[in-house]
Image (cartoon, rainbow, N blue to C red):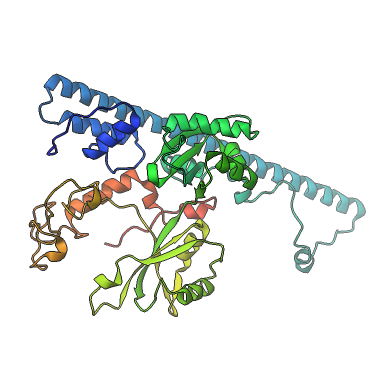
């Protein structure tokens, strides 16, 4: 570690988080701590200057044991997901068998009646069937009706993570100076469960609360029953009022990219947005934000198109745009889901933190790797990568071998990157991306 750590007093988890984030031992700042991030933090501590070998070995031993604990936990989640999916498949097969048995029984009865009377029973015509669309068959259920867990072809680890995400609720607007705002995660869990009990809820409610500071408070419900109870309008309103007057539920967003959209489109123009909603059949109740991935002011004068970033609160709208494309300025444009990518600092060109969190004093150019800001580079066409010490490309190049390695690591940590759509109850949304062309 290059940064010299100052002696500070740490009295609780919040002090500990601030200490670790301040000294870049826990990155990125503000993210909920995980066993992986804490074990990484311990490895960093073991490499600190002046740490004696016995202490360093003890710290590394704890880090390795934490990693083994996480692997065991993931294995248990995978096992539970496989068992749950197997039980669901068995239930589907049972329904199909019962349906087939009932149809065969009806068919045998019909044939016996025909043999008895020697008069064949007339079969219903297609017009008669189509004239009665409400006709249903006993025992038959659609895949969406019986689907509780992801389809059998889904990645079990991803299925477990998506199951957890589906039971999470983000609250924003909690006054950080209030009594509740100063509580840690464990205290918030106890307090929120007391509020739910006071509102009449019985049973297990909230299993985990993470205070993300100004970013909000993340709540994970114990089960679907608790989640559905809290999602009811009256219960949600009463719960939020008990916490604070300005507390709101922050909806989960889904980001997609439309490629090479003409710069004549203005995402800040209300008329353009209204036309966009109309031609793409976007519901007026759907929260939708649009912005250029790179500000037009940073585009060259010859550049006529750029990539447009769209964020929607509805996964179905985002998935429809991915499968069908989007109509903008009278043309249809290709759309893809926004992937999670490795974080690179634009100040020092290193990984896992942003420029506003960087503790390096001197800027490092992303073009030539010298000590000045990238936009002030006197030789923008003279490339030197600070990450792999190569003159064949700049530090910001998406073809940089170090960047591509980091992308692979990020994809391994985020298996949802392999999916083409945002996963929902529909089996087709769990399909994987097409492999890149050679």
* Residue 121 percent coordinates (x, y): 85, 58
At 58% from the left and 37% from the top, the residue drawn is 226
Left or right: where does residue 437 sit relative to residue 427?
A: left
Residue at 34% across / 35% down in the picture? 34
239 vs 252, nearest the viewer? 239
* Residue 354 visible in the shown view: no
In the rendered view, would you say 125 is above or below 52?
A: below
As rendered, which of 182 and 120 lies closer to the eye? 182
269 lies left or right of 52: right
The quadrant the C terminus occupies is bottom left
- Image quarter for residue 256? bottom left
- Which quadrant, please, contains the N terminus? top left
Q: Residue furthest front?
A: 177
Percent x, y for residue 70?
A: 35, 31
Residue at image coords 53%, 74% = 278
In screen coordinates, is 390 left or right of 143? Answer: left
Point out residue 364 in the picture as x, y percentages from the top left corner.
12, 55
The reply to whether residue 107 is visible in this rendering is yes
Q: How many marks?
A: 0
């Amino acid at each position: 570690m290059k940064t010299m750590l100052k002696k500070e007093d740490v009295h609780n988890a919040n002090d500990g988080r601030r200490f670790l984030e301040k000294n870049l031992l826990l990155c990125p700042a503000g993210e909920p701590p995980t066993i992986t991030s804490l074990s990484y933090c311990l490895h960093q501590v073991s490499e600190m200057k002046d740490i004696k070998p016995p202490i360093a070995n003890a710290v590394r031993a704890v880090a390795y044991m934490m990693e083994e604990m996480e692997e065991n936990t993931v294995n248990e989640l995978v096992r539970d997901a496989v068992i749950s999916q197997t039980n669901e498949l068995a239930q589907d097969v049972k329904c199909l068998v019962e349906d087939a048995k009932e149809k065969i029984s009806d068919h045998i009865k019909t044939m016996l009646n025909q043999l008895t009377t020697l008069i064949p029973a007339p079969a219903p015509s297609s017009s008669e069937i189509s004239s009665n669309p409400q006709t249903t068959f006993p025992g038959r259920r659609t895949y969406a009706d019986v689907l509780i867990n992801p389809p059998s072809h889904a990645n079990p680890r991803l299925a477990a993570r998506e199951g957890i995400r589906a039971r999470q609720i983000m609250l924003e607007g909690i006054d950080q100076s209030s009594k509740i705002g100063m509580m840690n995660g464990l205290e918030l869990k106890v307090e929120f469960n007391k509020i739910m009990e006071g509102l009449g809820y019985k049973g297990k409610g909230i299993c985990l609360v993470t205070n993300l500071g100004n970013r909000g408070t993340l709540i994970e419900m114990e089960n679907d029953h608790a989640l559905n109870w809290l999602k009811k309008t009256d219960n949600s309103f009463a719960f939020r009022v008990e916490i604070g007057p300005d507390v709101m539920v922050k909806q989960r967003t889904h980001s997609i990219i439309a490629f090479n959209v003409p710069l004549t489109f203005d995402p800040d123009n209300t008329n353009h947005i209204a036309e966009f909603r109309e031609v793409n059949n976007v519901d007026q109740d759907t929260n939708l934000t649009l912005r250029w991935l790179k500000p037009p002011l940073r585009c060259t004068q010859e550049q006529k198109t750029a990539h447009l970033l769209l964020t929607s609160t509805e996964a179905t709208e985002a998935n429809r745009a991915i499968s069908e494309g989007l109509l903008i300025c009278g043309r249809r444009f290709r759309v893809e889901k926004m992937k999670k990518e490795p974080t690179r600092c634009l100040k020092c060109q290193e990984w896992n933190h942003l420029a506003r969190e960087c503790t390096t004093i001197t800027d490092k150019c992303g073009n030539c790797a010298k000590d000045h800001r990238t936009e002030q580079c006197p030789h923008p066409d003279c490339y030197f990568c600070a990450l792999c010490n190569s003159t064949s490309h700049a530090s910001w190049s998406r073809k940089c071998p170090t960047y591509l390695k980091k992308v692979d690591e990020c994809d391994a940590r985020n298996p949802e990157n392999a999916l083409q759509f945002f996963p929902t109850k529909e089996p087709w949304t769990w399909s994987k991306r097409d492999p890149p062309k050679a």
